């Protein structure tokens, strides 16, 4: 912006300001009326339609799939893609905080007078990139496989065993491929079929070695299917 443009702008601003109305009471009145209307609409909607409450919380479930609200999906995805535990605080607290501080400090490090987007390429491109990144992470987070699913391909005769393993809470302690608790309480089971024989796998699930609970209650049929599935992992 050169000095002539600046003068022009200031003159225009002066004229507009004279034509305008004072903030109090005009703007305040408008805002207050709108606030009352919105509140009344909300009250009316909650009286007429009620609020959806979902199923009752069940503290004993092991198959609950925790999901954040959609507007947190990008953070959720960030947390999912960053595996090493030491980096998790950086990803979930560090990156958003750094971004927020950068935004707060913007008036101090961007001293340019320009306001037209294409004359501020760095700011415009950074903004667009952040929006694209958040959009992409949100999409990935929204379509992410649930923690009670195992992504590894399985021959069809082992599908049922895989489903039982996925839904019985094994993934809370064990990892299988991409899924489950990496660095959890139990060992990784991705290659368990090559490590111990099927009978030993079945026995482990049946008795629950160490701190692992026994899964005898699954019953003979399901236990066999679990053991067959795990034995197929190589
Ligand atoms: C509370 C955590 C926990 C859960 C839930 C759990 N496990 Fe384990 N699991 C462990 C731990 C810990 C070990 C290692 C125990 C030891 O050797 O002392 C283990 C060991 C095993 C082993 C033997 C691995 C080896 O290398 O010897 C198998 C197989 C196994 N678990 C399968 C399962 C299956 C299948 C399920 C679900 C039906 C399951 N686990 C659920 C914690 C768990």
Image (cartoon, rainbow, N blue to C red):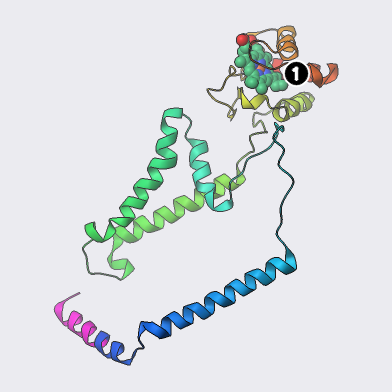
Residue 108: name its quadrant: bottom left
Magenta-drawn segment? 1-12
Q: Residue at x 22, y 69 (%)?
A: 113
Horizontal and vertical percent position of residue 73: 54, 48
**From where the camera sits, is residue 51 visible?**
yes
* Nearest to the observer: residue 168 or residue 196: 168
Q: Residue at x 64, y 32 (%)?
A: 151
Task: For the N terminus, give its image quadrant.
Answer: bottom left
Q: Which residue is drawn at 61% across and 23% down?
A: 173
Residue 178: name its quadrant: top right
* Nearest to the observer: residue 124 or residue 211: 211
Residue 201: name its quadrant: top right
Horizontal and vertical percent position of residue 82: 47, 34
Give the prevailing secondary structure in the magenta stretch: helix
Left or right of 129 in this view: 180: right
Left or right of 194 in this view: 206: right
Ligand 1 quadrant assignment: top right
Left or right of 9 in this view: 211: right
Mark 1 closeness class: few <14, some 14–19, many ≥20 residues within 10 Å: some
Q: Is residue 30 above or below residue 131?
A: below
The residue beneath circle 1 is 215
Residue 7 painted magenta: yes
Q: Is residue 182 above or below residue 191?
A: below
Q: In this view, does 99 lie above or below 192?
A: below
Establish whether ligand 1 lies closer than 8 Å to the Cβ of label 1.
yes
Q: SS class of the residue under badge 1? A: loop
Task: For the C terminus, give its image quadrant.
Answer: top right
Residue at the extreme left:
3
Q: Which residue is drawn at 76% across and 17% down?
A: 228
Horizontal and vertical percent position of residue 172: 63, 27
């Amino acid at each position: 912006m050169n000095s002539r443009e600046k003068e022009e702008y200031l003159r225009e601003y002066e004229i507009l300001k004279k034509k305008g109305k004072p903030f109090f009471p005009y703007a305040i009145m408008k805002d207050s009326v709108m606030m009352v209307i919105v509140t009344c609409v909300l009250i009316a909607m909650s009286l007429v339609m009620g609020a959806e409450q979902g199923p009752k919380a069940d503290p004993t479930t092991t198959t609950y799939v925790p999901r954040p609200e959609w507007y947190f999906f990008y953070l959720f995805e960030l947390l999912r893609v960053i595996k090493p535990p030491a980096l998790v605080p950086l990803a979930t607290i560090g990156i958003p905080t750094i971004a927020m501080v950068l935004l707060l400090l913007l008036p101090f490090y961007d001293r340019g007078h320009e306001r037209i987007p294409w004359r501020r390429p760095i700011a415009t491109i950074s903004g667009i990139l952040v929006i694209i990144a958040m959009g992409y992470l949100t999409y990935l987070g929204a379509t992410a496989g649930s923690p009670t699913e195992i992504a590894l391909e399985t021959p069809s005769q082992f599908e049922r065993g895989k489903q039982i393993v996925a839904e019985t809470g094994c993934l809370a302690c064990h990892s299988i491929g991409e899924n489950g608790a990496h660095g959890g309480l139990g060992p990784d089971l991705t290659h368990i079929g090559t490590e111990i024989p099927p009978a030993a796998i079945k026995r482990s699930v049946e008795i629950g070695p160490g701190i692992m609970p026994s899964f005898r209650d699954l019953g003979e049929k399901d236990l066999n299917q679990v053991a067959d599935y795990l034995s197929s992992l190589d």
